[in-house]
Amino acid sequence: MSASYSEKILEAILASIDEGIHVIDLEGNTIFYNEVAAANDGMKVSEVLNVPLLQAFPSLTEKSSTLLQVIQTGKPIYHKEQSYMNIHGKKIETVSSTLPIYVDDMLIGAVEIAKDYSSLKELSQRLIDIQASGKPKKAQANSTVYTFSDLLTNNPDFQQIISQGKKAAQSSSSILVYGESGVGKELFVQSIHHASPRRTSPFIAQNCAALPESLLESLLFGTAKGSYTGAVERQGLFELANGGTLFLDELQSMPIELQAKLLRVLEDGVVRRIGGTKSTVVDVRVIAAMNVPPKKAIEASQLRPDLYYRLNILSYELPPLRKRPEDIVLLGEHFIEEFNRKLRRHIEGISNDVLNLLLHYHWPGNVRELKHAIEYMINTAETKELTIADVPLFLQNHSPEAAKLLPLREALKETESKLITEALLQTNGNVLQASKLLNVPRQTLQYKIQKYRNVSEPRSK
């Protein structure tokens, strides 16, 4: 098959697929533009093909155009919402992925694959309106499920965080919570609301990663009648949460532009519905959570520094389960009781070999993963004790170390010994600093070092 024939086949395929395809060369000239892209952009193919990109779309710039950004960086951009004007003055909204084109390791251009977002947005907005019309006019008070008594821990660090959270509950200042997925951030946040003077007012949670930017904006701020075709007057979450707490999870997924609007509400306490002219004063405590370190999110341009400083008045980092080994047995027993009730089982305990596996596993999914593992074992158990035969495959195969089966007391001792050794290594053998790192009195740490004997104090250089 000749090269020219292959090119014709490729062009026919690109021309017939139901997504917009736009290709530019290194100079920013359009070298391929299919009919779907033209329809999405409200243009004719002839108005764009072989024309400089910024000439066909004058509202774009080298910084705002994803095609030109990819030409400059050589890196792909995925699932990006774009809003721009075409040469006829029509506003275009798309969701696109833009990829660099390499031939023989040389960058020769960029391709953008786009979907028309305008119709999808309107349908989604109407769906939100339909859902909102079926809900009560006021948000439900006392909508939290969890309280501080649900936060089970024997870990001194976590106990201290819970104590601080109880004090923070009496304040109205914003809160930022960081923790890996599955550590219990919403449980902690709900507990703060439930212990606060706002407990009888609404608690509303919204995951910022669940919706695209424009839908999230209208959901947060509400819409005015006529702001889009068929739009009705609708309260946003800020208005619905008035007097209570608004919990914004996965804050780093909120677009930077929308973060600026959130900051303004935090500063002024005023919201304005999309397409509206009236400002409404709201009294809402905002608690935000992230599953990536805030400083890393700032470096990755996922979090505005000024918003971070505004939210970071009260901040809490919830420890992962691997740093709370003393809680694994406690939580395991709690989940057995929970699933015995739910599944009508009568499991009485966990065998030592299973406990050893649980204590050695690193739990990347944290408490949520432990809960699911216990639920799996209770479903498969054939005796009144959870045994190795009931353990999920990922636990059985996670490491060679798990093959060493120890009695519970020895396993706990080994875990504690490892933590002490690691703390001493990190502090170059300084027992005082290590005791602070482990949050135990110096005398207690000194006693445990002598007790275990196999824990040596690394000497400072």
Image: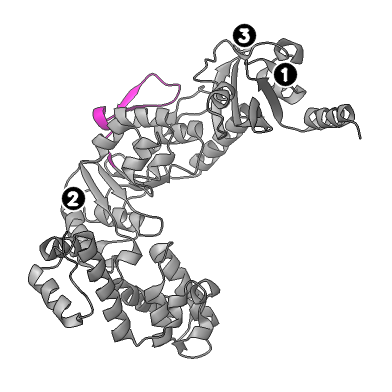
| Residue kind at label 3, given as amino acid type | Gln
The residues colored magenta run 265-286
Q: Which residue is mark 2?
A: 168
Count neighbours of disc 2 (C-alpha within 10 A) and say few if under 14, some if 14 to 19, many if 20 or more. Answer: some
Spatial CA distance of label 2 from label 1 is: 59 Å
Circle number at residue 55: 3
Count neighbours of disc 1 (C-alpha within 10 A) and say few if under 14, some if 14 to 19, many if 20 or more. Answer: some
Q: Are marks 3 and 1 in contact (CB under 8 Å)?
A: no
Residue at image coords 49%, 40%: 132
The x and y percentages for residue 422 are 26, 66
Relative to residue 447, is residue 117 depicted above or below?
A: above
Mark nearer the viewer, 2 or 1? 1
Residue at image coords 14%, 72%: 445
Spatial CA distance of label 3 from label 1 is: 14 Å
For residue 176, say whether it is visible.
Answer: yes
Count neighbours of disc 3 (C-alpha within 10 A) and say few if under 14, some if 14 to 19, many if 20 or more. Answer: some
Element at label 1: strand
| Residue kind at label 2, given as amino acid type | Ala
Q: Which residue is mark 1?
A: 31
The tag earlier along the polypeptide, 3 or 1, is 1
Q: Answer with the quarter of the image where residue 33 lies.
A: top right
